[in-house]
Image (spheres, helix red, strand yellow):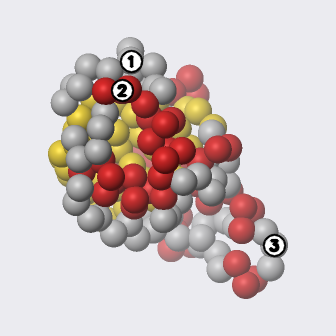
Amino acid sequence: MKQIVLIRHAEAENSYLGGSDFDRDLTTEGITHAIQLGRELNTEGLEVDKLIFSTAQRTKETTRYISELLNLSEEKLEEAPSIYNASVGQLYEMIQGLDNTMNSVVLVGHNPAISYLAEYLTEEFYSFVPASAVAIELDVEEWNHIVKGFGTIKFTKRM
């Protein structure tokens, strides 16, 4: 059995304030929601083998708060520049290529790809607002055996 937890980053500053989309920081509310989401995930007793995240500033900040609340060591964190602006197909390929010794992986990314991936894996629509998560159980022994609609939603969180 494998599990993937898909997380959309917390609320970021508006892009009209200047600067690049990639470098947007979390808002004060975004920080609060990232912390709340980390606490909620912790209450689920979430075991994490690897947390993979986009290198965009808002996902790095979201990851920092969540990983601290889940007590994850640096070895369990992995930056993945390819998540930023990834298509659902690219995220799916990333998951299929995961090391089979890992059973529970968290992926922190961006919409719309993160929403499309959840829908692809479960054939259920889930609207990812900022600082939301969906845990998907996959009844497979190897990540590359995942196919469309094979996942079952275990829990959802919205801040």
Residue at horizontal 26%, vertical 20%? Answer: 141
The image quadrant where one finds the N terminus is: top left
Q: Amino acid at mark 3?
A: Gly
The dot on residue 19 is 3
Point out the tag, 1 or 2, that comes first from the N-terminus.
1
Q: Amino acid at mark 2?
A: Trp
Whether residue 36 is visible here, answered yes or no, is no
* Foreground tag (2 vs 3): 2
Q: CA distance from mark 3 to mark 1?
A: 39 Å
Query: How crowded is the residue under tag 2: few (<14 C-alpha within 10 Å), some, or many (20+)?
Result: many
Q: Position of residue 101 (x, y in %)?
A: 38, 15
Q: Is residue 4 left or right of residue 149?
A: right
Asked if marks 3 and 1 touch (Cβ < 8 Å), the reply is no
Q: Amino acid at mark 1?
A: Asn
Q: Is residue 132 above or below residue 79?
A: below
Label 3's element? loop
Q: Position of residue 84 (x, y in %)?
A: 63, 53
Foreground: 95 or 106?
95
Query: How crowded is the residue under tag 3: few (<14 C-alpha within 10 Å), some, or many (20+)?
Result: few
Foreground: 128 or 64?
128
Residue labelled with disc 2: 143
The dot on residue 100 is 1
